[in-house]
Amino acid sequence: MTRSPVRHTIVVGGGVVGVCCAYFLAKRGAKVTVLERDQIGRAASFGNAGCIAPGHPPINKPGRVRQALKSLFHPLSPLYVAPRFDPALVKWLWSFSRTCTEKHVEIAMQSLAPLGHASRALFDELVEAEKLRCWFSRDGYYEIYLTERGLESAKEEMRMISRYGFHPEVLSGAELRQREPAINDRVLGGIFYPEAATINPYQFVLEIARRTERHGTKFRTTSEFVSLRIVNGRVRGVQLENGESIDADSVVLTAGAYSAPLLHRLGIRFPLQAAKGYHRDCETKPGGAPLLSHACVLGENMVFCTPMDGFVRFAGTLELSGVNHEIRRPRLEQLTKAASRYLQTMEDATVKSEWCGLRPCLPDGMPAVGPVSRYPGLFVATGHAMMGLTLGPVTGKLIAEHVLDGAPSMDISALRPDRF
């Protein structure tokens, strides 16, 4: 049964998840205001790999704990935990370690796979219906490997993913080079993921924001959320850093890596860690980055290589070093050094831009999406880790259903924010 339309919903956070929440709320007639502490789409949504990977498993793979322990002494490792005294990080790592099991990955995939399928379909609908200009490609991606060990591990993961309605394909090195000549002779083989897609993430966020504005949504940038206004136990608005109060019937918190401190102010335990990722964009002019027809994932190094408009984005790493935007140059340079081991013509690539951003990661590898029982009228949509872009549209749709209908159209009980 559909509720009466909510008079006013405030969305805190203007990244891909927040903008998608605003879009689906506004499209259904809700009055929406988006509050963004910086500029729309300029945080993690700005520079991520641009890969829509609906079959991607959570980050809690078996063996991650061993990799994390090794990374303490190898700061160029794809997964890096910066040594420091941080009780919250220690607790997070302990909780994370307990879920790095095959059983947990299977349980997580039972929730994440249906969401991935639904979100992938929503990308097609949004791009076509709204005529979005965002460098969208439905061509899938290749995950390529230099070693037999890496390839065999990828095949095991592929078999698991195949059980959830995806159709990955094993390819030899020769078959990969026939399809993608930029892949060099060192590559032994790989996996093709046909359901995947690529997009310019920043352009996607801006395009969705423009369409959302047409439905009457107001976007307020450089607006810092401080606290909720609670009246008779229910959310009735927010207070901003400048002292301004804004009335609302519901608030959706989509502040990414900044969500935890906001929730902590409300007395809500939320074990979220910021995981830094990097990108280096290189131009594809003669002698530059390779002209790729498909995105490629450099398997052993966890680097995405995504072709966009006149450049290739090399993106990756998972760095647990706190909430900061310090660029560790050796880690950044490792992206293109890794690419030169897998791809042709990388020596003289002209760098177009360099960037780092913070992904919001919860210890069980799954996002938090839904209402906060302690505060009626408060909803959370964060913790997507490396899946924020992939799951952005379906998250927005489900949050709109939560707010306007009282329940979502899919079972996302495993993602409830108060599960910790």
Image (cartoon, rainbow, N blue to C red):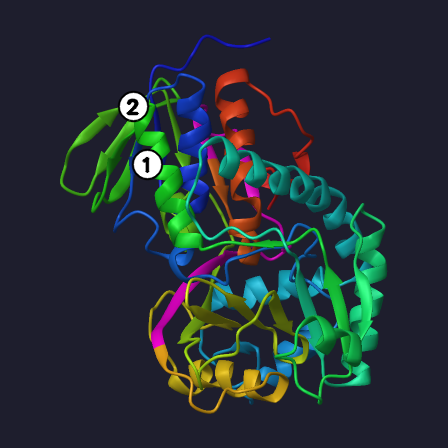
Q: What numbered label is drawn on residue 345?
A: none
In what element is the residue under mark 1?
helix
* Range of magenta residues: 352-379
Specify the quadrant of the image occupied by residue 217: top left
Task: Give me the residue at 57% from left, 78% from top.
Answer: 78
Task: Give me the residue at 31% from left, 22% from top.
Answer: 248
Tell me the mark number nearer the camera, choosing from 2 and 1.
Answer: 1
Task: Give me the residue at 50% from left, 39% from top.
Answer: 127
Give the quadrant of the N terminus.
top right
Q: Amino acid at mark 2?
A: Gly
Rendered location of residue 190, percent (x, y):
76, 73
**Magenta region includes residue 241:** no
Badge 1: residue crowd in 10 Å (few <14, some 14–19, many ≥20): some
Specify the quadrant of the image occupied by residue 12: top left
| Camera-side residue of 167 and 414 | 167
**Magenta region includes residue 362:** yes
Q: What numbered label is drawn on residue 216?
A: 2
Q: Amino acid at mark 1?
A: Arg
Rendered location of residue 240, percent (x, y):
21, 38
Rendered location of residue 338, percent (x, y):
56, 85
| Camera-side residue of 276 and 122 | 122
Residue 383 visible in the current orientation: no
Q: Which residue is mark 1?
A: 210
Between the C-alphas of marks 2 and 1, the distance is 10 Å
Instruction: Say which label, 2 or 1, has the lower sequence index.
Output: 1
